[in-house]
């Protein structure tokens, strides 16, 4: 109080104004240092990284990202891009897998399905069985959509092709008992040999095969161009058979019906494509 009493009133005013100016200058100085720190580029750079999928990816699992503050809400742009990339992989991998499996045959594909769950899923892929069907049988049925999928359709077609092969084995062996079991015992079954003669009914068909088997000439031939079509309870197979490769082939059609859990032949038709053929070869 003694100090203030010594100073005159003008001196006190000058001291007060000087103090205010000093405080104002100090405040300005502090403000100039604080503003750059508040709007520093690193914070802006951090936002750019979060919105850029190319630069954000290396930091997703730590590393330099640990030095940055984690964003509480993931940026939508990189998630959308990552989701698109995942979908592309899901579409690409099955195509590559199907192409690789197309080089396998039927037994190998079946064995592959028994290795593990991943291979079983790949081996049961419908596109793989469709590719295998076209490779082993025919491309004519590309537009077919099997009710139970291509794997079941392949199995049914292979069963019919095997049964058709059994028919030719019976003919080579000249086994009338086996042929009688091979045909359906019904009055509507029919057989047309290459001679053009029609036999209708089970008994007449069996008599026609007895005549064929009585020929002394061996019935050895080659089967080519086999085509099969399978429905629920009916199937037919077309093919060309060569008794002598120097002469024209026979066109053959075999029709089967499914009864009591197995396939039976109900129709056989053989015809000569061209040229004159000896009577014995015709019956072959």
Image (cartoon, grey):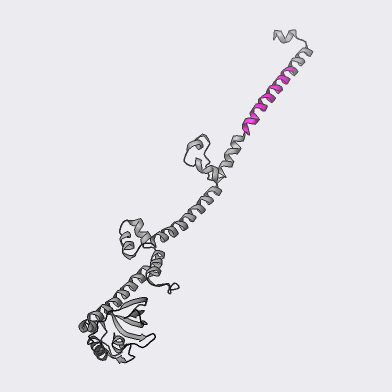
Q: Quadrant of residue 169?
A: bottom left
| Along the line of sight, the residue nearer the viewer: 271 or 164 | 271
Quadrant in which the C terminus is drawn: bottom left
| Residue 253 placement (x, y as % from top left) | 35, 82
Q: Is residue 284 positioned above or below 40 on the image?
A: below
* Quadrant containing the N terminus in the rendered view: top right
Can residue 271 be seen?
yes
Q: Is residue 35 magenta?
A: yes
Rendering coords of residue 188 (x, y %)? 31, 89
Q: Please tell me which residue is depicted at 75% across the width and 18% down the height of the picture.
A: 17
Numbered range of the magenta stretch: 18-38
- Decide if residue 39 is on the left or right side of residue 63: right
Q: Residue at x 68, y 22 (%)?
A: 26
The answer to whether residue 215 is left or right of residue 240 is: left
- Total numbered labels placed on residues in the image: 0
x%, y% of residue 164?
30, 77
Q: Quadrant of residue 133?
A: bottom left
Q: Is residue 235 visible in this depiction of the protein?
A: no
Residue 118, image x and y in percent? 36, 56
Residue shown at 32% from the left, 85% from the top: 267
Q: Considering only vertical position in the picture, is 150 above or below 111?
A: below
Q: Seen in the image, is 45 located left or right of residue 125? A: right
Provide the major secondary structure of the magenta segment. helix
Name the one closer to the observer, 125 or 275: 275
Residue furthest front in the image: 246
Q: Nearer the viewer, residue 177 or 12?
A: 177
Residue 175 is a magenta residue: no
Look at the picture and state if 216 lies above or below 29: below
Furthest-left residue in this view: 177
Q: Is residue 142 left or right of residue 237?
A: right
């Amino acid at each position: 109080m003694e100090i203030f009493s010594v100073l005159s009133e003008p001196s006190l005013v000058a001291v007060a104004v000087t103090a205010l100016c000093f405080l104002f200058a100090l405040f300005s100085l502090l403000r100039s240092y604080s503003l750059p720190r508040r709007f520093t580029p690193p914070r802006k750079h951090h936002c750019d990284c979060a919105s850029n999928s190319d630069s954000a990816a290396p930091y997703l699992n730590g590393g330099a990202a640990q030095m940055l503050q984690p964003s509480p809400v993931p940026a939508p742009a990189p998630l959308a891009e990552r989701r698109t990339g995942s979908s592309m992989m899901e579409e690409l991998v099955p195509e590559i897998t199907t192409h690789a499996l197309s080089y396998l045959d039927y037994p190998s594909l079946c064995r592959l399905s028994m290795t593990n769950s991943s291979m079983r899923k790949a081996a049961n892929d419908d596109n793989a069985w469709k590719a295998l069907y076209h490779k082993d049988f025919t491309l004519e049925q590309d537009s077919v959509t099997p009710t139970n999928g291509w794997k079941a359709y392949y199995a049914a077609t292979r069963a019919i092709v095997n049964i058709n092969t059994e028919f030719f084995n019976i003919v080579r062996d000249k086994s009338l008992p086996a042929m009688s079991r091979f045909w359906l015992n019904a009055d509507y079954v029919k057989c047309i040999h290459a001679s053009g003669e029609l036999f209708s009914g089970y008994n007449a068909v069996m008599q026609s095969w007895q005549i064929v088997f009585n020929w002394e000439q061996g019935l050895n031939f080659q089967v080519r161009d086999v085509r099969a079509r399978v429905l629920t309870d009916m199937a037919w197979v077309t093919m060309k058979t060569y008794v002598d490769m120097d002469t024209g082939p026979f066109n053959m059609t075999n029709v089967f019906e499914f009864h009591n859990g197995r396939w039976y032949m109900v129709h056989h038709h053989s015809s000569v494509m061209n040229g004159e053929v000896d009577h014995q070869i015709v019956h072959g």
